[in-house]
C-alpha cells in the first residue's frame, strides 16, 4: 500500500491554474508548478499523468466554476444577464485577468485535442445561453447571430482584460456595446 497523498486535488488545481493562466501551457515548467502547488514532481505525477493532464484538469475546474455562477441563467432572462456576463464573466480569485479558457485558445496548436473539444463545447453552451437570453428580447435579428457577436465581443474583452487595460474603459465599452445590441 502506497503512502497517502499529502495534498488536496482541488487545492492543487486552484494553485496550478494561475500559473498556466499567466504563462500559458508552453511556458509553464514543471518547476513552476511544483513551486506554486507545494507538491513535488512525484506527487504531481501520482495524481496527474503529465503536464497536459494537469492542464486539462485545471481547464475543466475553471469552466465548472464559471458555470456554477449562473450569470446567464438568472431569471428573468434578457439583456441584464448579458450585460452582467460581459462585466463579470471571467472572474477568478487572485491576479488573473481575462478568461483562462479564452487565453488557452491561443495555444490550441500545441495543446491536446481534448482542450479544443472542451473549450469548443463550453463556448457552444455559452452561445446557447446567450441566445436564450436574447430570444426573450424579441430582437429584429436572429438571436443566434447576435449570440455569436456577443461571444466574439466577450473574447475580445477577455484579451483586453488580460492586458490589464482599465476597468473603466471596459465599463464604457460594454455600455456602448449593449446600446448597439438593443437596437438589433
Image: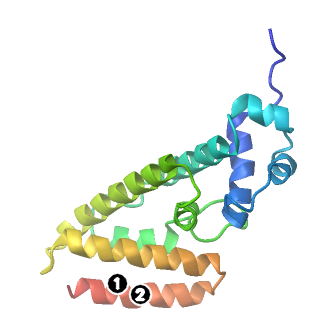
Q: Secondary structure at mark 2?
A: helix
Judge whether 109 appears above or below 170 on screen.
above
Q: Secondary structure at mark 1?
A: helix
The answer to whether any part of residue 182 appears in the image is yes
Residue 63 vs residue 23, the one in the foreground: 23
Q: What is the x, y in percent for residue 18?
A: 71, 58
Q: Quadrant of the N terminus?
A: top right
* 73 to the left or right of 159: left
Which is nearer the eye, 22 or 83? Answer: 22
The answer to which quarter of the image holds residue 152 is bottom left
Residue drawn at the location 64% of the way across and 46% of the way down? 52
Locate residue 97: give its quadrant: bottom right
Can residue 136 be seen here? The reply is no
**Eyeballing the image, is 97 above or below 164?**
above
The residue located at (68%, 35%) in the rendering is: 48
Image quadrant in which you'd find residue 20: bottom right
Residue 178 image label: 1
Query: Residue 158, image x and y in percent?
Result: 53, 74
Residue, far top: 1
User: Can you give x and y, in whole percent of width and height, for residue 168 in the image?
Assistant: 58, 88
Check the image and report above or below for 148 versus 31: below
- Which residue occupies the foreground of this view, 16 or 83? 16
In whole angstroms, how far apart are the C-alphas of marks 1 and 2?
A: 5 Å
Specify few, some or many for label 2: CA neighbours under 10 Å numbering under 14, 14-19, or 20 or more.
some
Say left or right for 116 vs 135: right
Q: Which residue position holds label 2?
A: 175
Does the CB distance between marks 1 and 2 fall below 8 Å?
A: yes
The image shows residue 184 at horizontal and vertical percentages of 20, 85
At horizontal 71% and vertical 66% (from top left) the residue drawn is: 22
75 is higher (above) or lower (below) than 152: above
Residue at x 39%, y 59% (from the top left corner) = 123
Amino acid at each position: 500500500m502506497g503512502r497517502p497523498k499529502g495534498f488536496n486535488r482541488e487545492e492543487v488545481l486552484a494553485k496550478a491554474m494561475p500559473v498556466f493562466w499567466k504563462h500559458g501551457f508552453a511556458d509553464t515548467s514543471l518547476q513552476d508548478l511544483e513551486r506554486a502547488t507545494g507538491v513535488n514532481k512525484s506527487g504531481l505525477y501520482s495524481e496527474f499523468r503529465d503536464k497536459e493532464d494537469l492542464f486539462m484538469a485545471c481547464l475543466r475546474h475553471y469552466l465548472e466554476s464559471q458555470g456554477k455562477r449562473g450569470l446567464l441563467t438568472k431569471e428573468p432572462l434578457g439583456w441584464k444577464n448579458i450585460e452582467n456576463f460581459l462585466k463579470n464573466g471571467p472572474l477568478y480569485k487572485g491576479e488573473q485577468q481575462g478568461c483562462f479558457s479564452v487565453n488557452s485558445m491561443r495555444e490550441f496548436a500545441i495543446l491536446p485535442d481534448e482542450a479544443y473539444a472542451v473549450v469548443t463545447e463550453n463556448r457552444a453552451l455559452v452561445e446557447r445561453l446567450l441566445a436564450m437570453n436574447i430570444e426573450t428580447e424579441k430582437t429584429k435579428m436572429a438571436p443566434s447571430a447576435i449570440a455569436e457577436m456577443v461571444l466574439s465581443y466577450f473574447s475580445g474583452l477577455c484579451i483586453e482584460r488580460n492586458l490589464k487595460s482599465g476597468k473603466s474603459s471596459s465599463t464604457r465599452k460594454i455600455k456602448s456595446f449593449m446600446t448597439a445590441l438593443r437596437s438589433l
